[in-house]
């Protein structure tokens, strides 16, 4: 077993058919409707439709085109009703029954520690012998899973296998693909606390953070299933006289999906199911920090009924197989979430034409952030402190949306700092299977070292207000740190640290605060605490981030409500969990038929 090269592992860098519908494509229509009281069954669909909302297929007149073009096969059942999308509720762990269930799940998952996970390409299970050992960042002596790593040759095979599976999977009706996604959501819901526990042990998430991550993964499946049903219906093109005009969305081809470790279920699941539900085949390369969660999600996809040919979970080092996957001429698109540098590299490599390649690859890249919260002189200081606190220190500051810069009006600067320091210095740090700890470990030894070195830099660039507290041994723990009086030119103001380190900066006035907030190559999330409507209006116009929040934290984007993605070096602004997202995995085909 190789123990070398892993970050959190012992040693590496930070590391929705057809009941005989006659006529052309029926419209898929969303409308308000009366709640159904019992499950509704169609040949390929069954929905428990206790809803206020219906997705209904309306069949326009005319059967001639159907016969001529075989459209009967392209349409789905007459009426499918899905309930309106609702965000998955998170369990409240102050409820004794939920606490007991979580403790049971933790014990159950712990009993599966150390299992070996071979690779799978199509139906073939492959043990390469080159293994990746994933450990518990709260207790690095505990091996969570042992994973066989892919070689470059296997990466090439995985793309070829996805290419071979593409014709059949891309012709699978959209309704069937959406049904499978809803089944994934059902399975995840049924096994929610088990997944929570894997996230606690492999990613170092506290119970509530793990629960939020798994809930978001369920949301992505539920939301994208409905979105696919919408996009599979007729699109609003103008009808020319004497023609039937339409626009169809078709899939792209083979997609390489490369997620990060910090939302090891939600982001991994969201990117993968978006690619699959739109009819693409997928090679998924999970982060080397959280391969067990990737493998477990692969098991769920198979359990839900996804054919084993349409996706591969290809565990392996990004540096060893990433380039191979990105450069393969049959790779059609890359969906990446991770750091700025890796995103830029992928974009550059994908842009280079390879022999035999017959398309320009599409890159969806969501990257880092240096997210500011602006605290106005006229604001509710207690709620500002609370918002900054949870945004900066939730999941140890390891969220792309984490607040790493608090920019505070000089009139309330000292009072803000005092209240924040009192909160931050009371944080309990320790293993996150113990629910008393607010702050768990960071993901890896190399991440810990990087964060500590930024704290050293910060000592010269500002004034340590909170920091240096003793932390437990045996895991990758870092003390929560607040550094005040930081200038905008400081490295700790400009560079993503990805840990529990907050820079606080004084602003002359609101205008100056917005200027400072925009002084960054990133543009992911931001928040403003203010009671002044004019200032909020100003921020709405000038604060250049993909996700802007008023009088609330800058983390915790909700699927459906807060489509997520950033500007500038934060990425391609894909707006995951929003109505534009699935279009990134599709191409539009316009069909015009002369009829008179
Ligand atoms: P990372 O180091 O860039 O890794 C991300 C993924 O890329 C991993 O699966 C990694 O594999 C892979 N990879 C590494 N080198 C590669 C290469 N040469 N070619 C192809 N793939 C390669 O980022 P991370 O540490 O996992 O995640 C933290 C970063 O993600 C932060 O910057 C954070 O802000 C960002 N993030 C952004 C968003 C967003 O929506 N904007 C959301 C979450 C996180 P290995 O693990 O095997 O190296």
Image (cartoon, rainbow, N blue to C red):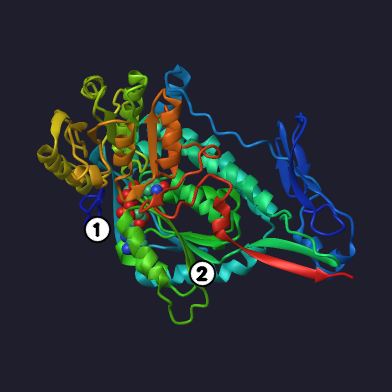
Residue under the point 60% across and 34% down:
86
State which quadrant residue 82 falls in.
top right
Q: Secondary structure at mark 1?
A: loop
Work out which quarter of the rendered image holds the N terminus and state it: bottom left
Instruction: Please tell me the numbered disc located at residue 468.
Output: none
Local SS, label 2 = helix
- x, y percent for residue 286: 40, 54
Q: Disc 1 vs disc 2: Cβ atoms closer than 8 Å? A: no
In the picture, the quarter occupied by the C terminus is bottom right
Q: Earlier in the sequence, mark 1 or mark 2?
A: 1
Per the model, the C-alpha gap separating discs 1 and 2 is: 27 Å
Disc tally is 2
* Label 1 packing within 10 angstroms: few (<14), some (14-19), many (20+): some
For mark 2, what is the residue?
Answer: 161
Of all residues shown, which one is farthest toward the bottom? 355
Camera sees residue 150? no
Residue tagged by mark 1? 2
Which of the 4 image quadrants contains residue 595? bottom right
- Residue sitting at x 16%, y 34%: 473
Q: Seen in the image, is 317 located left or right of residue 165?
A: left
Which quadrant of the figure has residue 386?
top left
The image shows residue 584 at horizontal and vertical percentages of: 54, 57
Q: Foreground residue, 280 or 400?
A: 400
* 131 sits left or right of 583 in the view: left
Residue 525 % position (x, y): 39, 41
Q: Taking 179 as reference, is 325 left or right?
A: left
């Amino acid at each position: 077993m190789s123990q070398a090269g892993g970050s959190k592992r012992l040693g590496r860098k930070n590391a929705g058919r057809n009941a005989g519908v006659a006529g052309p494509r029926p419209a898929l229509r969303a409308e308000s409707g009366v709640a159904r009281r019992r499950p509704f069954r169609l040949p390929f669909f069954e929905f428990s439709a206790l809803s206020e909302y219906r997705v209904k297929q309306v069949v326009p007149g005319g059967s001639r085109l159907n016969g001529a073009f075989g459209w009967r096969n392209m349409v789905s059942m007459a009426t499918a009703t899905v309930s309106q999308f609702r965000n998955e509720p998170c369990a409240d762990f102050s409820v004794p029954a939920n606490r007991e269930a979580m403790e049971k799940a933790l014990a159950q998952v712990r009993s599966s520690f150390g299992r070996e996970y071979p690779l799978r390409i199509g139906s073939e299970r492959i043990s390469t012998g080159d293994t990746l050992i994933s450990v518990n960042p709260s207790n690095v002596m505990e091996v969570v899973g042992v994973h066989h790593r892919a070689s470059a040759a296997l990466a090439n095979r995985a793309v070829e296998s996805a290419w071979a599976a593409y014709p059949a999977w891309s012709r699978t009706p959209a309704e069937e693909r959406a049904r499978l996604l809803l089944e994934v959501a059902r399975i995840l819901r049924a096994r929610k606390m088990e997944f929570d526990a894997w996230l606690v042990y492999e990613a170092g998430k506290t119970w509530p953070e793990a629960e939020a991550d798994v809930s978001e993964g369920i949301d992505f499946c539920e939301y994208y299933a409905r979105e696919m049903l919408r996009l599979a219906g007729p699109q609003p093109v103008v009808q020319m006289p004497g023609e039937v005009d339409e626009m169809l969305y078709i899939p792209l081809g083979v997609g390489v999906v490369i997620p990060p470790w910090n939302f090891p279920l939600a982001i991994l699941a969201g990117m993968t199911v978006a690619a699959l539900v739109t009819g693409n085949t997928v090679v998924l390369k999970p982060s080397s920090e959280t391969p067990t969660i990737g493998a477990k999600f692969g098991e769920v996809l198979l359990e839900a009924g996804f054919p084993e040919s349409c996706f591969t979970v290809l565990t392996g080092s990004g540096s060893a197989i990433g380039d191979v996957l990105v450069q393969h001429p049959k790779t059609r698109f890359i969906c990446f979430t991770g750091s700025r540098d890796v995103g830029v590299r992928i974009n550059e490599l994908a842009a280079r034409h390879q022999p035999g390649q017959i398309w320009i690859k599409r890159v969806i890249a969501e990257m880092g952030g240096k997210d500011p919260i602006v605290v106005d002189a006229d604001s509710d200081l207690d709620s500002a402190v609370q918002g900054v606190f949870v945004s900066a220190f939730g999941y140890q500051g390891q969220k792309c949306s984490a607040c790493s810069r608090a920019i505070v009006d000089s009139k309330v600067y000292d009072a803000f700092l005092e209240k924040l320091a009192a909160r931050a210095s009371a944080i309990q740090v320790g293993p996150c299977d113990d629910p008393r700890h607010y702050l768990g470990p960071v993901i890896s030894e190399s991440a810990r070292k990087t964060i500590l070195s930024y704290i050293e830099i910060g000592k010269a660039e500002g004034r340590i207000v909170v920091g240096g507290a003793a932390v437990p041994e045996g895991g990758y723990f870092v003390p929560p740190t607040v550094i005040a009086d930081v200038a905008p030119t400081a490295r700790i103001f400009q560079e993503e640290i990805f840990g529990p380190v907050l820079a606080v900066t004084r602003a002359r006035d609101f205008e100056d605060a917005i200027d400072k907030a925009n002084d960054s190559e990133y543009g992911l999330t931001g928040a403003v605490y203010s009671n002044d409507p004019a200032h909020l209006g100003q921020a709405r116009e000038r604060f250049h981030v993909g996700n802007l929040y008023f009088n609330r934290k800058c983390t915790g984007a909700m699927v459906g409500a807060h489509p997520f993605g950033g500007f500038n070096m934060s990425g391609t602004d894909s707006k995951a969990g929003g109505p534009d997202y699935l279009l990134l995995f599709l191409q539009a085909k316009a069909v015009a038929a002369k009829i008179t």
